[in-house]
Image: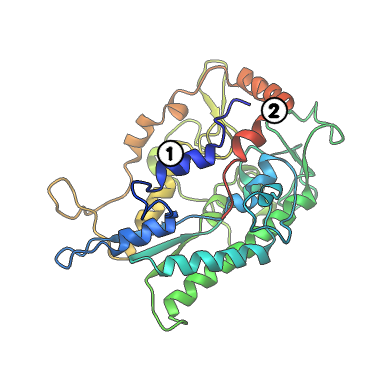
């Protein structure tokens, strides 16, 4: 197992404040509340915009482990919760309420809440075959690892999720997102007596609009609301245009597909995170946030410079020429050591 022992705890030691007995007990919410309370009446410091992007890990285990284990009554136990890969909507909403209470106590002028993306869009779980289970369906019969090709896939031998399991996980995520949306609506309406400047960034909808095999390449599966996400000109000018396929290179070593997800099949590439950052900037601009230039003057167009971002994204610009052999190594490591579940299943849920 080529991972640092107790990786999550070690990361917490680096991220959370521990320089005194008074602060050693702080969670990230406590630390944010302390930052929000640090205000200067002249400049109004503290937190200008707080982004809350939680919840993906409450369903991500379903694809990193390729199994669906719904949360049980002991889902709040820090040890027992590791046995679950998907939170029931009821359990998610209960924990979301605790997060909402913590966020309300943070002195942030604006708060952006992000919805949870559908985890089956990530290419770590690849839909098997060229055909969906039916015309107009979003789902393939099985989802397995990208290093197992259609010819060699055997459902009785290879780990996989069925179409019914994938649909169930997506439905749970839809219910997570309904709860997040209602949270923002109630805060803006001031249902608890305080009107808050909270916003919603629909990351789930954003990735759905970039989902290659689910919607982009299957017109019959597209719902009425669906339209392709308008990639910035700099990304559209790349050949091929970045998509949500697993990253692949051709015989010359150039990128043949993919570009939005990194080689772990879950996290974004630099340009993928740039798209997310650009959407956050749009909401911050809507909230009246000013983006100063080097001279302190407000930038007329604070959008992400994707030309610059492409130059820094070496994975997309010059991908490894041996990705096919790398996938074979990933496949061997996963079959031998359970690489995907170990490497990608260590983060705690919300």
* Residue 76 disc label: none
Could you tell me which residue is drawn at 38 percent across and 47 percent down?
Answer: 18
* Distance of label 1 from label 2 (alpha carbons): 27 Å
Which residue corresponds to mark 1? 271
Report x, y in % for residue 17: 37, 48
Front residue (pair 317, 56): 56
Badge 1 crowding class, 10 Å Cα cut-off, few under 14, some 14 to 19, many 20 or more, is many
- Horizontal side of 152 relative to 16 (left or right) equals right
Q: Give the colour scheme shown.
A: rainbow
Which residue corresponds to mark 2? 334
Q: Is residue 261 above or below residue 277?
A: above
Report x, y in % for residue 16: 41, 48
Q: Is residue 78 above or below residue 285?
A: above
Could you tell me which residue is drawn at 42 percent across and 70 percent down?
Answer: 104
**Snapshot quadrant of residue 205:** bottom right
**Snapshot quadrant of residue 168:** bottom right
Report x, y in % for residue 59: 64, 51
The furthest residue to the right:
156
Identify the element where label 2 is drawn: helix
- Specify whether residue 245 is in view: no
- Specify whether residue 177 is in view: yes
Q: Is residue 323 above or below residue 276?
A: above
Could you tell me which residue is drawn at 51 percent across and 20 percent down?
Answer: 320
């Amino acid at each position: 197992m080529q991972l640092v022992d107790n990786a999550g705890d070690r990361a917490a030691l680096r991220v959370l404040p521990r320089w005194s007995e008074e602060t050693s007990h702080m969670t990230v919410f406590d630390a944010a509340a302390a930052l929000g309370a640090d205000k200067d009446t002249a400049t109004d410091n503290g937190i200008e915009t707080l982004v809350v992007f939680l919840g993906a890990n409450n369903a991500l285990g379903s694809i990193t482990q390729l199994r669906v284990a719904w949360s049980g009554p002991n889902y709040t136990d820090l040890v027992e919760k590791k046995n679950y890969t998907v939170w029931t909507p009821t359990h998610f909403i209960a924990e979301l309420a605790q997060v909402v209470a913590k966020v309300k106590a943070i002195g942030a002028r604006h708060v952006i809440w992000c919805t949870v993306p559908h985890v089956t869009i990530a290419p770590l779980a690849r839909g098997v075959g060229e055909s969906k289970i039916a015309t107009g369906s979003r789902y393939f019969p099985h989802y397995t690892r990208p290093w197992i090709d259609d010819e060699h896939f055997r459902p009785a031998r290879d780990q996989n999720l069925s179409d019914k399991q994938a649909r169930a996980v997506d439905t749970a995520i839809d219910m997570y997102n309904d709860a997040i949306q209602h949270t923002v609506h109630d805060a803006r309406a001031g249902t608890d007596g305080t009107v808050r400047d909270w916003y919603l960034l629909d990351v789930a909808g954003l990735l759905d609009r970039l989902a290659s095999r689910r919607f982009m390449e299957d017109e019959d599966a597209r719902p009425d609301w669906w339209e392709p996400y308008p990639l910035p000109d700099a990304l559209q000018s790349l050949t091929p245009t970045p998509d949500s396929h697993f990253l692949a290179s051709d015989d010359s070593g150039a990128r043949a597909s993919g570009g939005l997800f990194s080689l772990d099949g879950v996290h974004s590439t630099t340009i993928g995170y740039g798209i997310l950052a650009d959407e956050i900037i749009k909401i911050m601009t809507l909230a009246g946030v000013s983006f100063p230039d080097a001279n302190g003057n407000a930038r007329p167009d604070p959008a992400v410079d994707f030309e610059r971002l492409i130059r820094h994204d070496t994975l997309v610009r010059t991908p490894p020429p041996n990705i096919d052999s790398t996938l074979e190594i990933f496949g061997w490591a996963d079959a031998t050591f359970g690489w995907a579940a170990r490497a990608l299943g260590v983060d705690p849920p919300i």
